[in-house]
Amino acid sequence: MNSSPQSLLPPGIHVLVHDWLSANAVVTWDDAQSASVVDTGHVSRARATCEGVRAALGGRRLRRIVNTHLHSDHCGGNAPLQREHGAGAPCPILVPAGELPGAGAWEQADSAVAQAGQQAEPFRADAGYAAGDTLWLGGLPWQAHAAGGHDDHALMLFQPDARVLISGDALWEHGFGVLFPEIDGGDGFAAQRLTLRRIEQLAPRLVIPGHGPVFAQPGAALERAHTRLDVFEGDPQRHAAHALRVLLKFHVMELAAPPAREQLARWFEDTAMVQRAVRRFWPGRTPAEVFEQTLDALARVGALLLSAGRVADPELH
Ligand SMILES: [Zn+2]
């Protein structure tokens, strides 16, 4: 008998578990003919995502793409999936309402993807949804709830009868996403605390996180998240250093081949979000110095490998 948390999901909810570069995709069988998908992974994994979604549809038509938030690892399959499933009746893309202006226009310099120096394929969003809205997925009503902290506009989806939460990057089994608003002087810490309390009030039985496998009884995960948040809140520079490590490792993972160390340094120094973090948290240091400390920290724990002047991800390259 299979008693994994995933097997406890309501029928018609299929979680395609990906990796840290590419967020999980959740395919829901909305009725006998049609299905939706929540989040679509990273553009570099779009082919695998499209294949996974096609298999999970069970012959149904993909009628809608929903995003919890518009980071590059959550919406990279939007355009490819829309192309594949858009013939005749274009498959609409639903995004958090706060993101609707300019959503998917990654070619613009002020877009989130450009600011983080990441890769994504542009797409056109068709509609927004907001906290308080109800979305029908898998034949069940799901409530949208605000999930600030990691991203100001992020939403999570809660199904109150089955008590299942699609949490995006607000809560993983071991942690949560970088609190990006903190890098720009916003209050990501307070927003994340509010989001964790909101999850406690909802009291989900199962969590479908943006990364990692489905997990049950999230009490321990919430406790870990509060502890982690306490540490970051007590030492914002430590959180900023973590954010830069995540951005640097993510960029190496995006590249098909290990970049030269100098190429990686140039990317780091040219990325707008990195520049802002350095100005705010290491005002006496240059981006080049902060690059060296960030790379050293990742190499020390084996998260990146330095060899023959190149920087590789030990699991990908
Ligand atoms: Zn994210």
Image (cartoon, helix red, strand yellow):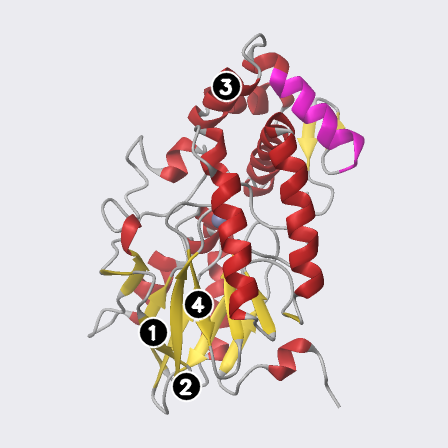
Question: Which amino acid, by three-letter code, is at mark 3?
Answer: Arg
Q: Earlier in the sequence, mark 2 or mark 4?
A: 2
Q: Earlier in the sequence, mark 1 or mark 4?
A: 1
Separation of residues labelled 2 and 3 (CA atoms): 51 Å
Separation of residues labelled 1 and 3 (CA atoms): 39 Å
Q: Earlier in the sequence, mark 3 or mark 4?
A: 4
Element type at mark 2: loop
Q: Position of residue 239 (x, y in %)?
A: 61, 33
Which residue, given by chain and number where applicable, does mark 3 sit on? Answer: 280
User: CB at mark 3 closer than 8 A to ligand 1?
Assistant: no
**Is 104 displayed left or right of 241 in the figure?**
left
**Is 254 displayed left or right of 108 in the figure?**
right
Q: Is any part of residue 74 visible from this angle?
A: yes
Which residue, given by chain and number where applicable, does mark 1 sit on? Answer: 135
Mark sitting on residue 202: none
Viewer-nearest of labels 2 and 3? 3
Residue extent of the magenta highlight: 290-302
Which residue, given by chain and number where applicable, does mark 4 sit on? Answer: 157
Element type at mark 4: strand
Element type at mark 3: helix
Which quadrant would residue 75 be assigned to in this image? Answer: bottom left
Which residue, given by chain and number where applicable, does mark 2 sit on? Answer: 59
32 or 11: which is nearer to us? 11
User: CB at mark 4 closer than 8 A to ligand 1?
Assistant: no
Question: Which amino acid, by three-letter code, is at mark 4?
Answer: Leu
Viewer-nearest of labels 2 and 1? 1
